[in-house]
Image (cartoon, rainbow, N blue to C red):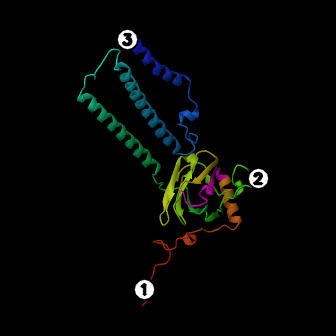
Amino acid sequence: MRSNRRLRWAAIPIAALMSVVLAGCTQDQLQGWLPTEPGTTNNVDRVIGLWVTSWIVLLIVGVLTWGLTIWAIVVYRRRKGQTGLPAQLRYNMPIEIFYTVVPLILVLGFFAFTARDQSAIEAAYEKPDYTIQVFGKQWAWDFNYTNDDVYYAGVQGQDDPDDDNGNLVESEIPTLYLPVGKQIEIQLESRDVIHSFWVIDFLYKKDMLPGKTNYMYVTPEKEGTYTGKCAELCGEYHSMMLFNVKVVSQQEYDSYIESLRAAGNEGQLGHEYDRNQNLPGIGEPAHEEE
């Protein structure tokens, strides 16, 4: 009788787990509900793999922990007619070793795989096909296409008067163009306060710090329009500091560059427009009067 009860309790979590597995998984589930599609950039699949694998390992650990907890509650519960405390154990050396070694292996494993993927994602291109300089500013973006010596000057997004959902006028949102299949080096700068350059579908963001240049290396592999935003609270209109990234063919990219040139946007928007002109390394060096 007692064996039947134990089997019944063990069957419940097994049946629940089998139901989930047999139900099948959608693509969103397979990639851990991350907001992108596999193959969007050269780094996306790597991030998805690290994310999903980590959750699978943690889920297995969780199921084992919950199962052992429920098993101990059921098997060693107080029976009818029992009184007093059960037999007390001071320690159990094999279990103590197990509880120490397993978490250590998990922590070292997570660290090793994270360090491996981070190193690959942050690896600089020796000879990037294009270099683009991005300036974050309250509350918009400037894009310098350095290879072609043209620029785009962004303006702050404005509420769409015809939209009751609080969306911005789409045509006024700054747009960064990238050619598909090309190695891109993006230099990240700030004109005033700390911002953060986040392309959601690229599964990547990096801070933009006044007086410091950060770098992002990416090869976009799917054409399309992707949403970007500032991911660092940077002031009153932070929520309006949006931008789009358009990954286009080489022909369309070249046409866009020529449209900037035809509009008179030749040259580069440098640090002369920064608000903090007294930061180290900015402006002319001071000279003592003789």
Q: Residue 10: image x %, image y %?
A: 42, 18
Do the CB atoms of the residues marked 1 and 3 lie less than 8 Å apart?
no
Q: Disc 2 or disc 3, which is closer to the eye?
A: 3
> Is residue 276 found inside the magenta-colored segment of the image?
no
Q: CA distance from mark 2 to mark 1?
A: 58 Å
Front residue of this view, candidates 253 and 141: 141
For disc 2, the neighbor class at 10 Å (few under 14, some 14 to 19, many from 20) is few
> Is residue 239 found inside the magenta-colored segment of the image?
yes
Q: Disc 1 or disc 3, which is closer to the eye?
A: 3
Q: Is residue 113 left or right of residue 259?
A: left
Residue 220 visible in the shown view: no
Residue to which mark 1 is pinned: 288
Considering only order in the chain, which callout, 3 or 1, is on the residue closer to the N terminus? Answer: 3
Front residue of this view, candidates 48 and 166: 166
For residue 105, which quarter of the picture? top left
Residue to which mark 2 is pinned: 162
78 lies above or below 244: above
